[in-house]
Amino acid sequence: MNILEIKNLNLSFVSNGKEYQALYDINLQLKKGEILALVGESGCGKSITAMSILKLLAPNAKITSGEIIYDGLNLLSLPEKEIQKIRGKEIALVPQDPMTSLNPLYTIESQLLEIIEQHQNLKGYEAKKVAIDVLEQVKIPNAKERLKAYPHEFSGGMRQRVIIAMAIACKSKIIIADEPTTALDVTVQAQIMELLKEIQKNSETSFIFISHDFGLVYEIADRAAVMYAGHIIESANSKEIFKNPKHPYTQALINALPDMNTTKLEAIEGQPPSIKDTFLGCPFTPRCTKRMDICSTKFPIYTYNENSNVSCWLYK
């Protein structure tokens, strides 16, 4: 059963009177209790897709068409007052940088209680009890005492745990984790990944996990959608897409992963296109080692099969 559906989402940015398209016919489904990964290089549209769900977009962003269906409602048609009831409570966000997401002037307690009081309608002792409980769930030691601490008194990994605690404090049905381990070392990264999987298992929370690291995606995600230049170019079960990638871009991303058996990394030549670049065919064509004449003149048809979906002329 799908808890969230994105249907034919198109988004543009307006700059100096001109409109530049950033997302092209995005279609995604998120099932209850599932971890769906959005994978790709920086600037490919992962975060913009996720922020569209929460309607946390820049003033110059413009959704030109599409629907985002949650609990039978099209979120894009709801007024801001109604979205505020969903944002943070039903659908929560774990951002990249916890230091800039936590207010350095307020204690962890005051920031947690604000969310709990607003979305859980709890006060005083009951609210504080929930705050201590969620800190314990994310494995912060001496949770009761640490409530009085300020963000700068926590390490990067502990600050990220606080952000996750805020996300689960209101028992959110969906958590969007936007590269939640980017600024963390490998050991802490593994701990955060294990924590997210534990939350999913114990609460059946659905996750949208945004990353450029296929290694992390393989470990945590049930399904993966690969994005490039505002398009979803391949989607499949994460294990299947890792072992048998079909799109040349997906293959290049996986080949770029470090290998313990070699010191050589296979880099992807060239750069992703700018939002201002226009193209008739596949946007990956200039960087693709398997390109054909048709690739530069016509966008590939999306091919569906039993195991994976891919947008590439190799599979016409």
Image: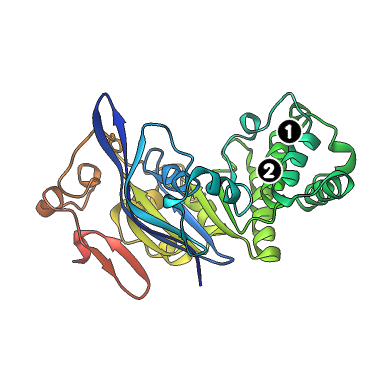
Query: Which residue is farthest bottom?
Result: 306
- Residue at 26%, 36% in the rendered image: 20
For this rendering, which residue is in front, 217 or 151?
151
In the rendered image, the vertical position of residue 21 relative to residue 298, given as above or below: above
Side (left or right) of 151 relative to 40: right
Mark 1 Cα shell of 10 Å, populated few (<14), some (14-19), many (≥20): few
For this rendering, which residue is in front, 215 or 61?
61
Secondary structure at numbered mark 1? loop
> Which of the 4 image quadrants contains residue 194?
bottom right
Q: Which quadrant is home to the C terminus?
A: bottom left
Going by the numbered disc 2, the residue's amino acid type is Val
The answer to whether residue 269 is visible is yes
Nearest to N terminus: mark 1 or mark 2: 1
For this rendering, which residue is in front, 6 or 301?
6
Q: Position of residue 61 (x, y in %)?
A: 37, 36
Q: Position of residue 314 (x, y in %)?
A: 20, 62
Q: Where is residue 264 in the image (x, y as percent from the top left)?
A: 42, 42
Q: Which mark is residue 188?
A: 2
The residue under label 1 is 155
- Residue at 46%, 53% in the rendered image: 75
- Residue at 20%, 42% in the rendered image: 286
Side (left or right) of 57 relative to 133: left
Mark 2 Cα shell of 10 Å, populated few (<14), some (14-19), many (≥20): some
- Residue at 70%, 39% in the rendered image: 157
Instruction: Report if the CB atoms under discs 1 and 2 are less than 8 Å apart.
Output: yes
Q: Where is residue 161 in the image (x, y as percent from the top left)?
A: 71, 43
The CA span between labels 1 and 2 is 10 Å
Q: Which mark is residue 113?
A: none
Side (left or right) of 132 relative to 240: right
In the rendered image, the vertical position of residue 106 relative to residue 42, given as above or below: above
